[in-house]
Amino acid sequence: MRDAALSGEHKKITLDFSDVETLSVEAAVLLVAEIHRCSSFLGRRTQITGTYPRDPAISSLLTEIGFFKALDIREPLLPKSYAPVTFVQIERGNRTDAELANRLLDCFTHVFAFEPADRRRLHVALIECMDNVYQHAYAEPGRNPYLLNEWWLVGFADEASSTISFTFYDQGAGIPTTIRRKQHKRIADRLRHWNDAKWLERAVQKGVSRLSSKRRGYGLTKLNEFVRELQVIGSLTVVSNLGAVIFPSTSSVRLHPLSVGLKGTLVTWQLTGISNIQVSDATHDHIADVSLP
């Protein structure tokens, strides 16, 4: 879609969803982000539109996240019997947005109401993810004029599966590129054989930034700690450049080098089966000195 849109050879591009049978929320976020940036760059030169899926589950997902809104076309009609999942539609921004973080946490209350201290801890981690985008992801001027220097965020709460999740995406340089750039030359030389997945693991476990601010670079670290300290099935997944890393709550870290890379960074945080959640005392020990905007 990006290549076709930016080539300048087409007046109209149609995304055909008629035969799509499965679609993840993460894929939908990437699609909407591409639509936003291509549309912003192209203006009226090229129209991007799409078809309606035959599967009501796909139609519901695309409707709830704001896909048809991004294309500026009418949403499809869904069967009255279809039970939708509670979504926060895809939001885009280029700054820290504490109110959006609150709306996402409000969405989660459809499945589970966190204790105030736990809600605050998640809020802080979200704020740090937003901070990182304009502090790190787009730190160097991009060579591509169609980059928007923005982030995209979507979240959902599914009562049927007792699941809450959010996905955060930016189109920046990617965490492996950013963290390599911040290392001392001696360390970078010693670790030069590391692949992107290994650098992602380091970024989550130790934080991306070494700046003086306590809020910069550690959002992923807090999200991972939070998942592991709950008596629940959960995970933190980070995909960036040529690497992917999954931090499950109940098993060891899984690293996945990729042959086809992702431009930017995609983060997905998820808890499942939280109706019987047990919060350990340790989850309340990390928020004492953190200030919010």
Image (spheres, helix red, strand yellow):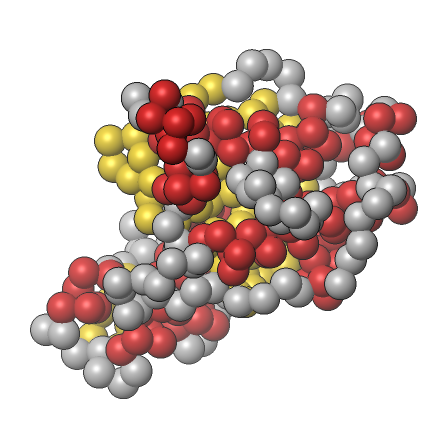
Quadrant the N terminus occupies: bottom left
Residue lying furthest bottom? 44
Q: Percent position (x, y) of residue 131?
A: 60, 56
Q: Quadrant of residue 175?
A: top left
Q: Nearer the viewer, residue 42 or 220?
A: 220
Residue at 33 percent of width and 48 percent of height: 263
The reply, left or right, for residue 178 in relation to residue 231 is left
Residue 146 visible in the picture: yes
Q: Percent position (x, y) of residue 287?
A: 82, 41
Residue at 19 percent of width and 68 percent of height: 6
Vertically, is 61 above or below 270? below
Residue 160 visible in the picture: no
Q: Quadrant of residue 217?
A: top right
Q: Percent position (x, y) of residue 189?
A: 33, 26
The reply, left or right, for residue 145 in relation to residue 291 is left
Q: Nearer the viewer, residue 16 or 177?
A: 177
Q: Quadrant of residue 34?
A: bottom left
Quadrant the C terminus occupies: bottom right
Residue at 53 percent of width and 67 percent of height: 94
The reply, left or right, for residue 229 in relation to residue 68 is right
Q: Nearer the viewer, residue 231 or 136?
A: 136
Q: How many marks?
A: 0
Q: Percent position (x, y) of residue 268?
A: 54, 41
Residue at 60 percent of width and 46 percent of height: 211
Vertically, is 6 above or below 80? below
The reply, left or right, for residue 119 in relation to residue 147 is right
Residue lying furthest left? 9
Q: Nearer the viewer, residue 175 or 88?
A: 175
